[in-house]
Image (cartoon, grey):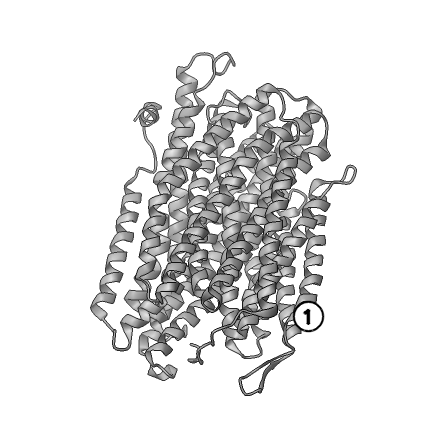
């Protein structure tokens, strides 16, 4: 437990500092303008054949309908949280700002997700059209520029929200930013969970009935789940991932600004804005320079763009640190507390940038088609699906260890830069996160490239308007997209861990500040429930509970996919059996019914994971105290990091192992090895695209809730306002809601029984 430290002074934003914040705001607007320009370039490309446009329109209609229903479902929840935030202790001005910017953060997160989806569905047909005309370079440019639009929106809106809060609220900005980050994280988690359930339920259903049972290709128009599968790619991989990376961006900024204002005052409030602003500039450069050269692999071009932009960010961030920051941190009396502040801050930022590069390489090693691990998984297909599943699990477990060690080393390295000053050390961890943020614009572009290229291939296959050469181009782009999706998940996880660790520091600052305001002058005056050392039984129990929530959350997400996929399988089987001419290609499947099942089931499953994330910190904090809540967050961060990497990389290795076989290895399509890898990929789908990615916003939501409620826990535990009855009452109510939600979820039938008629009845109901 940290010692009770003096209260941070109010910061005054004026002169050069004010000018710099305004400059950051201007850069955010430039990023948004560049995004609009990239969007125009994408839409100017050829929209493909009438048949391609027809299929694309069906996918767009389904995606629009799903997101509209999702936002309507979540609207009431946002209003409820907006009102509940007023109950937390703070000045009325801060309460209003926190609640208003909670809504702003939620709206920005939703807008990013919607933008990612709306442009992706239009880009899909344009990439397919470029491939049809034999332009590999054109197809890749369209797909990457589509991602560039979303990347510019991510960094632009993130910087816009943060800089506006700093300009308006100045010294109170960190408290208001808690609301902004919470809104972004909460919406992102819902979009990640809902979109993930939708896309993987459709994908699993399409694969098991189409590839395995009927022996038809993945995107064959005879498969009733194909449109839903393509819709899912856009609402899950595009909208969900875009919202996820935006909230990582926003939450990292929130943590850095909170800790920076405590450690350095006004300079700690401004410098964390400067670093991501540099990243916005380099993201523009990265999107522009990403072009294939001749016949080179598309992944090589994307990696080159990433590394060049990362180097530029590193150079510019170093210059900014040496120009803006003082040489030493001094006390009010002029005593030098920490020397070499410029070089320490520079090293912290560089740690984040280097971490992004290392994670990119490491994830590519375990999931890429050129690397040994994925090739080993593909070879196990010769001995059946069981060995494929076992090999993929082994890859996931091993990669999680290396990734966690690397992230842990980065966190520890950043912490040691503080020279023993706790507040400064935590700030450097957040600053490392800001360094990683300088790559986010390009990372978002890389991630969006994946589903756009995947959907382009699906639309081309369904339309039959493409020759063998064009199909080869799309297959190559899809293979690159599979790898970019996998490696960006690794970076998203690293960002989440850094942000959550920094928020952990913000949580410590929040409860210590509240304790000081009550009159606590030293740690010895605090009750036992405030002990945060891991040797304390309450802290250890909290750690176990935090890890347990991650496991429960993952299980709920995977079970949700299982239920929805089961309904889809029965529906697709029913249509094949009852609609004459489907398999002969003379009758059209009822695509809309499968889309309806995915939509309803994914939205139905949103409540339980959301309540689990928002209420379990309240149960632990109010019920067991600050010490247990600290352990809870530590347990969630550590287990969440390992679980997310395991799920993501297992799924990525299975996916690319299937691609290797489909490209001709070990017997190719239609072989027993192919069937085995399809099973592995099916197992991996909810791993890598539902449960794994959703853990990122989960741990940040729990951390932000803890930061927000920490003052209330302190106020009800010690001092004149202590009220054990009220505190335990709040914990019991929250616990009752969580238990009820989990029970309701578990009562839903997991293994759907019977023939196709139940599915048909569900659709009709």
- Image-quadrant location for residue 418: bottom right
Q: Which quarter of the rendered picture does the C terminus lie within?
A: top left
Q: Would you identify the image quadrant in which residue 427 lies?
A: bottom right
Q: Residue at x 50, y 20 (%)?
A: 222
Residue in the image at 52% along x and 26% along y: 57
Q: Which residue is mark 1?
A: 323
Spot the residue most to the right: 294
Report whether 140 appears left or right of 219.
right
Q: Is residue 563 visible?
A: no
Q: Residue at x 46, y 61 (%)?
A: 177
**Is 61 situated left or right of 542 in this image?**
right
Q: Is residue 244 left or right of residue 668?
A: left
Picture quadrant of residue 270: bottom right
Extreme front residue here?
A: 15
From what the image shows, is residue 393 above or below residue 712? above
Rendered location of residue 116, percent (x, y): 54, 40
Q: Secondary structure at mark 1?
A: helix
Q: Nearer the viewer, residue 7 or 287?
A: 7
């Amino acid at each position: 437990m940290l010692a009770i430290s003096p209260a941070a002074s109010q910061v005054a934003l004026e002169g050069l500092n004010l000018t710099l914040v305004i400059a950051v705001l201007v850069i955010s607007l430039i990023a948004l303008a560049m995004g609009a320009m990239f969007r125009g370039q994408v839409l100017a490309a050829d929209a493909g054949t009438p048949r391609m446009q027809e299929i694309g329109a069906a996918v767009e209609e389904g995606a629009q309908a799903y997101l509209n229903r999702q936002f309507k479902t979540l609207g009431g929840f946002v209003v409820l949280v907006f009102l509940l935030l007023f109950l937390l202790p703070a000045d009325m001005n801060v309460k209003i700002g926190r609640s208003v910017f909670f809504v702003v953060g939620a709206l920005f997160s939703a807008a990013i997700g919607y933008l990612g989806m709306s442009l992706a569905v239009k880009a899909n047909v344009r990439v397919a059209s470029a491939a049809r005309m034999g332009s590999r370079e054109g197809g890749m440019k369209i797909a990457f520029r589509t991602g560039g639009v979303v990347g510019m929106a991510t960094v632009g809106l993130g910087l816009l929200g943060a800089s506006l809060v700093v300009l308006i609220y100045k010294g109170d900005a960190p408290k208001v930013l808690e609301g902004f980050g919470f809104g972004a994280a909460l919406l992102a988690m819902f979009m990640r969970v809902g979109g993930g359930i939708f896309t993987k339920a459709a994908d699993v259903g399409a694969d098991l009935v189409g590839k395995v049972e009927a022996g038809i290709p993945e995107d064959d128009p005879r498969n009733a789940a194909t449109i839903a599968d393509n819709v899912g790619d856009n609402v899950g991989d595009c909208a969900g991932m875009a919202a996820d990376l935006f909230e990582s961006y926003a939450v990292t900024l929130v943590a850095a600004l909170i800790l920076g204002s405590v450690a350095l005052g006004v300079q700690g409030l401004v410098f964390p804005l400067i670093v991501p602003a540099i990243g916005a500039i380099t993201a523009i450069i990265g999107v522009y320079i990403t072009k294939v050269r001749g016949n080179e692999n598309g992944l090589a071009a994307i990696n080159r763009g990433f590394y060049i932009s990362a180097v530029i960010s590193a150079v510019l961030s170093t210059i900014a640190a040496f120009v803006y920051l003082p040489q030493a941190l001094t006390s009010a009396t002029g005593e030098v507390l920490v020397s070499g502040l410029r070089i320490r801050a520079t090293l912290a930022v560089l740690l984040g940038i280097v971490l992004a590069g290392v994670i990119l390489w490491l994830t590519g090693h375990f999931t890429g088609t050129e690397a040994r691990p994925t090739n080993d998984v593909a070879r196990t297909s010769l001995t059946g699906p069981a060995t494929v599943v076992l090999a993929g699990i082994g890859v996931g477990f091993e990669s999680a260890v290396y990734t966690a060690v690397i992230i842990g080393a980065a966190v520890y390295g950043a912490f040691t830069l503080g020279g023993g000053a706790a507040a400064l050390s935590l700030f450097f961890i957040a600053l490392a996160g800001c360094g990683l943020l300088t790559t986010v614009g390009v990372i978002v572009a890389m991630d969006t490239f994946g589903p756009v290229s995947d959907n382009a291939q699906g639309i081309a296959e369904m339309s039959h308007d493409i020759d063998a050469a064009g199909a080869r181009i799309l297959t190559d782009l899809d293979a690159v997209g599979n790898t970019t999706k996998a490696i960006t998940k690794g970076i998203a996880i690293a960002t989440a861990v850094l942000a959550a660790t920094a928020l952990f520091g913000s949580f410590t600052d929040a409860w210590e500040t509240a304790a000081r305001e009550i009159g606590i002058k030293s740690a010895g005056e605090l009750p036992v429930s405030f002990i945060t050392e891991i040797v304390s039984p309450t802290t250890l129990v909290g750690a176990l509970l935090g890890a347990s929530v991650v496991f429960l959350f993952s299980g709920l997400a995977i079970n949700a996919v299982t239920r929805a996929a089961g309904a889809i399988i029965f529906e697709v089987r029913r249509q094949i059996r009852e609609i004459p001419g489907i398999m002969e290609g003379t009758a059209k499947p009822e695509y809309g019914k499968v889309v309806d099942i995915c939509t309803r089931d994914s939205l139905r499953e949103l409540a339980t994971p959301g309540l689990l994330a928002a209420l379990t910190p309240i149960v632990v904090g109010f019920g067991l105290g600050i010490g247990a809540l600290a352990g809870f967050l530590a347990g969630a961060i550590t287990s969440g990091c390992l679980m997310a990497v395991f799920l993501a990389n297992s799924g990525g290795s299975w996916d690319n192992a299937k691609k290797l076989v489909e490209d001709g290895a070990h017997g190719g399509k239609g072989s027993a090895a192919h069937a085995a890898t399809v099973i592995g990929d099916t197992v991996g789908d909810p791993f890598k695209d539902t449960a794994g990615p959703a853990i990122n916003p989960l741990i940040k939501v729990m951390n932000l809730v803890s930061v927000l409620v920490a003052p209330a826990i302190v106020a009800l535990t010690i001092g004149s306002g202590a009220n054990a009855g009220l505190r335990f009452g709040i914990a019991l109510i929250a616990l009752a809601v969580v238990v009820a939600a989990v029970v309701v979820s578990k009562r839903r039938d997991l293994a759907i029984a019977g023939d196709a008629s139940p599915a048909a009845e569900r659709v009709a109901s």
